[in-house]
Amino acid sequence: MSFLAPLMLIGVAGIAVPLVLHLIGRRRARRVRFAAIDFLFGSDKKVRKRLRLRERLLLAARILACTALPLALAKPYTACQASGPLVPHGPQAAVLVIDNSFASTFAIDEESMLARSRERARRILQQLGPEAEVAVLVTAEGAEAPSELSRDHLRLRDRIRAIESSSRPADLSAALRRAGQLLAGSSQRIRTVYILGTPAASSLRTGESPWPAGAVPQLNLVDPSDGQALDNMAVTGVTVEPDHETGARGIRVDAEVANFGAHQVRERPIALRIGNRVVARGLVTVEPGQRTRKRFTAALPPGTRAAELEVELAPDQLAIDDRRYALAERTAEIRVLLVNGDPRTVRYEDELFYLSAALRPGDRSDSGAVLTTATGDELMSQRLDEIDVVVLANVSALPAPAVSRLRQWVEAGGGLWVTAGSNVDVEEYDQRMSPLLPQNLSGAVDLVHGARGDERSGRALSLAKLEVDHPIFSVFPPDAPGLREAGYSRIVLLGPTTEVSRRQVLARYDNGTAALVEAEAGKGRLLLYTSTIDRDWNDLPIHPGFVPFVQQAVRHLARVSPRGRPRELLVGHQLLLDIGADTVRIDVDRPGGHRSVFEGEELADRRQVRFSETDAPGFYEVTDVKREGSGSARGDSDFAVNLDARGSDLRRAELAQLTRAPEHAGAVGSDTHERRVELWHAVAAALLLFLLAESFIVWRH
Amino acid sequence: MSAAGGGRTGRTGGGPDTVSELDLLDPVTVSRLETLPVRARVIVEGALSGLHRARLHGSSVEFAEHKEYSPGDELRHIDWKVYGRADRFYVKQFEQESELSCYLALDASGSMDYGEGGRSGGPGLSKLIYAAHLLAALAYLMIRQRDKVGLLVFGDESLDRYVPARARPAHLHDLLAVLEEVTRVGGRGSEPTSRALDRLGELTRQRRSLLIVASDLFEQPEGGALAVLRRLRARGHDVALFQILHPHELELPFEGLTLFESLEDRRELLVDPAAIRRQYKRRMASFLDKVRSECVRGGVEHHLVATARPIEQALLEFLTARAGRSPARAG
């Protein structure tokens, strides 16, 4: 115990006063030599004892009162360890960074860490006092941040109370950067950042220090887990592949399970659900810091081409990442009629050689495409109702009946792809093939005419501008090296057109001319490629981008979800939804029974709409509402949203990682602090008690 | 007598009808008279003034024989039946009357020293001096009656005194001298009264006597003296007890913080008397009741005397009580 005014302790000598008074009183008391002293004491020992006790109690009460008074004036206090950081009171700038990522739902004693952090934030706000300028930030990736510090503590308290957990991982680096910006704008001398949460190494991004040079704030870590180990297991990935050995509906599901804890986890139950029914169970054992794969084989329910899958781990303290969602679908077989406009006996010289190989790699039955080849003359004899896509590869202009038939077929929902070549006569195509083209042709150009060797490659065009959001190119990385490296020596040019509303140029050469053009025709689609599909006019077929290019183009024409089109997203990510020709509204049903609606101006004059409300993990169903009022579920557009597995790694960041500022060494506050406890109030109360006791004893007798 | 200065008025004939009507000297005034013999005489005369000549009789007198009347004999003892037969005057002679021995026992322990003149220095006469004067008066009266009187002073075993019973007039001086010395020395010691009375019982075992005890009966254990008194009475002695108490011991009138110190040992008590007065008086009353009832039960004559009361009054009440009890009164 220590004292604020130790000199006051001199007054403790005052305890001699009651003693002296007692002795003086005793001495000054009238002395009477009395014969009947036995009657004073009484034969009752209790009376004697009571008298003696009263005297002693009275003396004790007076001594204690005389002791308590100087003790109270000396202002005693003691120090004790209190949880939480030492929060200064008074003018200052402070930012409270609260972890609300999905990791904050980690439960300790049936209470989430977020709830604990909110409570501690509220306490810190109270301790800061009304003169402090404060901002409250959250760490979830992409969260909005306040623009300034505030003294409106009521609003800040409401903000703290309103913080809910997000399904996104934490981005502590961004939060600290924003905190640094807010504090840099303050004129207060004392600047502090309170981090309420368990900073995980996974929440830090590489980069510069968030603090401006020379303006390093005080960092205080407030750990809601109180140092407890945050062992966590999570399902971090699910892949679904057809398993033909099981059957036509067979699937193989590989689940990746990670153990981010410090101890081995033995035989943790794991299950596979299809359509909310458990179809397979297993056990996993994972070493600390390791991952493992668990394989399930199952079959899709009969009569279904697609199903919703969940891989579920026995829940631990962070339950949200113990399941992962995936969509499984049987491979859609696309029936493609390849019309060969330039058949050759030498296979690799055949117009369709590269196209056929790309659509049916290795001629495997699971390639997803059923190919039928025909010549232009045989076209009329083909049953188009059994075909999804027709490719006119370097075909001469068709007779009118064939054109009409194809046009009707396209308008009924078919997809037609016209590729150029030496057999494409521009004038004849303009006269007869216009109904089957997105845009008329104006002529063919030989770009390398007369050039030799390297000059040929120098003059050749290459694909430069690609509509990367389009389903055909969505599977390619932004630079698309497998496409852009191809050289085009001859192309056909497109003629002018005024009908641009339903036409779209999907790719251009580096000279700006169109390479790939698409148009809607009724319920179907038209696609025009202004070069050959073989190697006659370009060398795209020998570049790695050729195969995915033709596969995506065919799938797009067949209105099948492009292979590789993201059917699984991470929380917070966006995707584009196709807008059909007569779609008036698109409904997206989200987990939790919520619905997002796109209609009116959101869809007008657009082919795609951006969907960004992927805040919750689970299955999202997309429904088209057509002009005539009917709605149909677009199974191929449904998708699953999962947590970003980075947020499941709760292993704590090292201090150096957190601050990234050498001058911070030693400037980080601890989670406990020494608190002064004033004792003089208790001593003053005791003094009052002693005085009351003394008065009572005197009054009583 | 002028030194007495008391409020005494002379009365001629037709004495007062009650004791309270007597104009008596206060005990302090009596105690300031010249000598104890003088004081004793004053006390006796004061007690007997206005009353018929009284004698101290033994309570258990028995007719022994007739004796021819001679001048000075009690007229009331003349046996008129014999006169009717013999035509001569004969007086009855009683055994006690002819063999009355009286022993006076004075408690001179420390507790008797409370009051003026005592070591306590309190107001009023000390109990010891009061008791000594009372016994001196009794001795004076009985010696004048030619009764044998002895004296036992107890309290401090080293200072105890015993004077055998004699009837000679000169014996009175011996008795009074011892009493005077005791009063001068003061009360001390804490010899139990019961032990002293046992000794008295031994001294008087040969013949029945009148035993007059003057004590406050403050002894431990309480009640021992009463048992001895009852035993003495049972042996045939005529026992009378003067329980002498100071008014302070009856009322505890002290105010303010007081340190009470024992007169007989080293005990002391610092207390506000007001805080314990009620309990004290209750305890004292209970003690006095017990003494009274034990005496009644044992046939012991009990007189509670406060030292503020005139000694003559106490003596007169004692004599009056004994006269009322004596069967010789019927004459």
Image: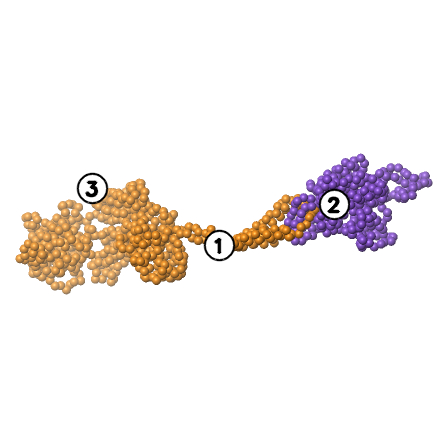
Chain colours: A orange, B purple
Task: Name the residue furthest bottom.
Answer: A498
Cα separation between marks 2 and 3: 136 Å
Residue identified by numbered label 2 = B185
| Residue B66, label in figure | none
SS label for mark 3: loop
Binning the other alpha carbons within 10 Å of mark 3 as few (below 14), some (14 to 19) or many (20 upward) gives: few
**Contact (Cβ within 8 Å) of mark 2 with mark 3:** no
| Residue A6, label in figure | 1
Residue B10 position in % (x across, y down): 85, 54
Do we see residue A228 in this rendering? yes
Q: Residue at x 85, y 52 (%)?
A: B15
Earlier in the chain: of badge 3 and badge 1, it is 1
| Residue A245, label in figure | 3
> Amino acid under label 3?
Glu
SS label for mark 1: helix
Cα separation between marks 3 and 1: 89 Å
> Amino acid under label 1?
Pro
Q: Residue at x 74, y 45 (%)?
A: B185
Residue A405 position in % (x across, y down): 12, 56
Do we see residue B21 in this rendering? no
Binning the other alpha carbons within 10 Å of mark 2 as few (below 14), some (14 to 19) or many (20 upward) gives: some
Q: Chain of mark 3?
A: A
Q: Chain of mark 1?
A: A
Residue A332 position in % (x across, y down): 19, 49
Mark 2 or 1, which is nearer the eye? 2
Residue B295 position in % (x across, y down): 75, 42
